[in-house]
Amino acid sequence: MDIVELRSDTFTTPTPEMRRAMAEAEVGDDVWGEDPTAIALQERCAEMFGKEAGLFVPSGSMGNEISIAAMTRPGDEVVCEAQSHIVLYEMGGPATIAQVMLRTIEAPDAILEPEHVAAMIRPQSSHTSGTALVSLENTHNARGGRIVPLDAMHAVAKVARDRGAAVFLDGARIFNASVATGIGVREWAAGVDALSFCFSKGLGAPVGSMIVGSREHIARCHTLRKRYGGGMRQIGVLCAAARLAVDTMVERLADDHANARRLAEGFAEALPGCVDPASVETNMVFADLQARDAAALAGALWEQGVRVGPTGPFTIRAVTHKDVTRDGVERAIAAFSAAVRGS
């Protein structure tokens, strides 16, 4: 049975062109700074985002965590949205790696209000830790793949900088935001001091993320990457696929967005009220099963060759990507409809 894999866009497989590029990549020892394919990719991404330098890292979590560590000191405070990836899905990294405290703000629509951020930022004193960093996320995973508007990001960044805090962006899926809005990634990056983004999600590369920022920031991240075991050797094998990802796989993200909207429409037809298709801005669909058991429904879909991820007792997530065709979307809708009727 062909599988319709909707649990995450991390399940993408490299294209034949990526596999050939990996096999033929010119390589060197990157720990010594001598891998030409890695160097070229880092320079390409820094230029693309309008930053001074870049650093290839094995994962988005490492990119986020060493960036936070590079932009703070132990005991500092970091302000972020309460359902951010760094809060929910990075194994307590801010506390254990950077040794910082997270101060969170609930924003159900993923958009932090500048006045709420301003109220959270505190100066260092004899009684309080100072706020060193405001961390943003775009698109926002746990809030449904929502796009934080550019002007909203800029407003928060201004408040942070006016109060002496730096700004970091977890841009794991920033290309999804760019394609959906038509706003180039350089514009998204302009308002933040540093950001990370992933090659291994919707862009389809097998491994890797990139940090871009100032030369000083990247130098600190380079040290931290080595310290935490991310100093790799002939990484040109991986960077060759990542280069193809950013050069050839961005514009097709629009197909994923269209497929996600169709998936949401089908889910809503099968179970009215479970999702508002108009709220699906990129490649994620979160469905409220209205007291139906999410694990049981996901199991019923699994039997039909459709894989979705439970995100709570009564909610599921489905994520479209390059390996999910429109036919696969229609199969998923049919399987969901049958499962709902049988529940």
Image (cartoon, rainbow, N blue to C red):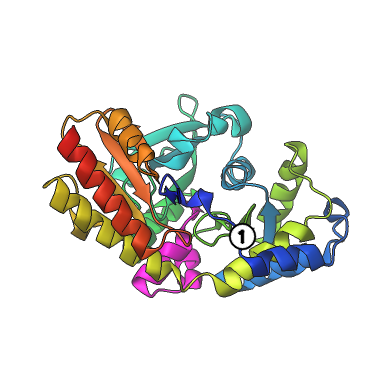
Give the position of the C terminus as an image quadrant. Answer: top left
Specify start and end residues of the magenta stretch as a single range. 168-191
Residue beneath the point at 38% across and 38% down: 302
Q: Is residue 34 above or below residue 6?
A: below
Residue 291 or residue 329, whichever sits in front: 329
Q: Quadrant of the rendered structure where residue 308 is? A: top left
Residue 108 placement (x, y as % from top left): 25, 43
Is residue 233 something one can see in this rendering? yes
25 displayed left or right of 337: right
188 displayed left or right of 286: right
Residue 45 placement (x, y as % from top left): 63, 68
Which residue of the protein is positioned furthest toward the left in this rendering? 272
Residue 176 located within the stretch drawn in magenta: yes
- Hey, what amino acid is under mark 1? Pro
Residue 305 placement (x, y as % from top left): 40, 44
Residue beneath the point at 44% across and 35% down: 87
Residue beneath the point at 54% across and 33% down: 94
Q: Is mark 1 on a helix, strand or loop?
A: loop
Which residue of the protein is positioned furthest toward the top in this rendering? 127
Quickly name the residue at label 1: 14
Residue 327 or residue 264, whichever sits in front: 327
Residue 72 located within the stretch drawn in magenta: no
247 displayed left or right of 316: right
How many C-alpha atoms fall within 10 Å of the one at disc 1: few (<14), some, or many (≥20)? many
Residue beneath the point at 58% across and 56% down: 13
